[in-house]
Every structure is written in structure tokens, then in C-alpha cells.
Amino acid sequence: MVVVARNLIIGVKDYCILAVMPLLVLMGCKQNMDQSPTKVTGDEQIQITMEEVQQAVSIFNEAMVNPTVELMDDLCADQLTYWHSSGLIQNKSEFIDDIVNGPCHFMSLEAADQSIHISGNTAIVRHIFLAKGTNTGEPVDVCIGNV
């Protein structure tokens, strides 16, 4: 799945260093919904459904609240590049280490006002990323618009 994404910060109360935009990561996630190997080359199209995309968002959001190295490794593509709004750029292993061992921990996560548009083998998901958590032990609320 190839997706170009850009985030729009619409408000952050008590800024969290790891203001995670899960769909940016999700868009780089492995396509393993049916567990069968799929190779996409050139203009080949894979049909994805709205339900599969909603399930992928839900699985990823749950993983962000209770992350493990193994789970995040399964969900994230090896080519993952995660760009924070601070300018920090992480590869897959750096991102996973930050999610699992970093200073920010999510207690709850919601994808509010979500819309999904599917075009061929590309899903464009928009939502408001609402999270409650802690950053170095201090409570934080995060509100970020994602594409």
C-alpha cells in the first residue's frame, strides 16, 4: 500500500514529546490482514474493504495503548520512516523503541470523526487523534488531525 500523508496539528494541551500520528505509521504497515503473502508490483491493484481499513486502524490504536516490540514489529513495515512534528525522524526500530520504552505512554486513544476513502489499493483515512496518557509521568492530552 502506498500512501502520501501529511499531518495537521489542530491543538495539543500539555504537549507530548511523542505526539504520535498513528495513521502515518499505519500507512506504512504490513498488509497482513488475511495472513497470505501478497506481492504488489507496478500497477497491480489489491482490493481492500472499508471494514479491513477500520479493523487495521483499531488494531493499531490498541497496540499504541499496550505496545510490545513483537506486536509493533508485526504491524509496522520494515521501510517505515516516522517524522515527528518536532522534526525528529525515526526508522522502524527507533520508532518501536520509542513507543515501547519512551517517555510517553497512552492510556486511551480514539480516532474521532473518522472518514475513509478507498481508491484501488490505497486507503486514505482522516481522523482526529485523541489520546490521554503520560509524558515522563505527567498527564497529557493529545489532539491531532491526521491524514
Image (cartoon, rainbow, N blue to C red):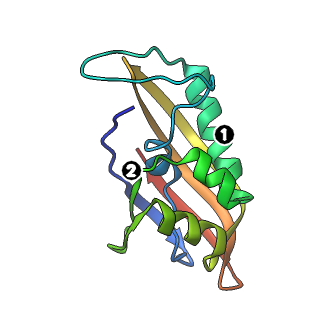
**Residue 27 in picture, x, y percent from top left:** 44, 41
Q: Distance of mark 2 from mark 1, alpha carbons?
A: 22 Å
The quarter holding residue 100 reads bottom right
Nearer to me, 17 or 144: 17
Classify 55 as above or below 136. above
Residue furthest to the left in view is 42
Left or right, residue 59 beside residue 143 = right
What label does residue 79 carry, if any?
2
Please name the amino acid that badge 1 sits on: Ser
Element class at badge 1:
helix
Q: Based on the displayed image, in which of its 4 quarters is residue 106 positioned?
A: bottom right
Say which of 147 and 35 sits in front: 35
Q: Residue at x 48, y 58 (%)?
A: 144
Q: Which residue is depicted at the point 50% across and 64% down? A: 93
In the picture shown, does residue 17 fall above or below 35?
A: below
Displayed quadrant of residue 55: top right
Q: In the rendered image, which quarter contains the C terminus?
A: top left
Q: 62 or 40, which is in the foreground?
A: 40
Local crowd at mark 2 within 10 Å, few (<14), some, or many (≥20)?
Answer: few
What residue do we see at 69% from left, 70% from top? Answer: 133
- The reply, left or right, for residue 85 in relation to residue 47 is left
Residue at label 1?
58
Instruction: First in sequence, mark 2 or 1: give its number.
Output: 1
Q: Quadrant of the N terminus?
A: top left
Mark toward the viewer: 2 or 1? 2
Using residue 143 as the reference point, say whether residue 39 is left or right of it: left
Give percent across and percent down for residue 128.
52, 49
Q: Which amino acid does label 2 sit on?
A: Gln
- Label 2 sits on a secondary structure element that is loop
* x and y percentages locating residue 101 in the rendered image: 65, 75
Point 63% across, 69% down: residue: 141
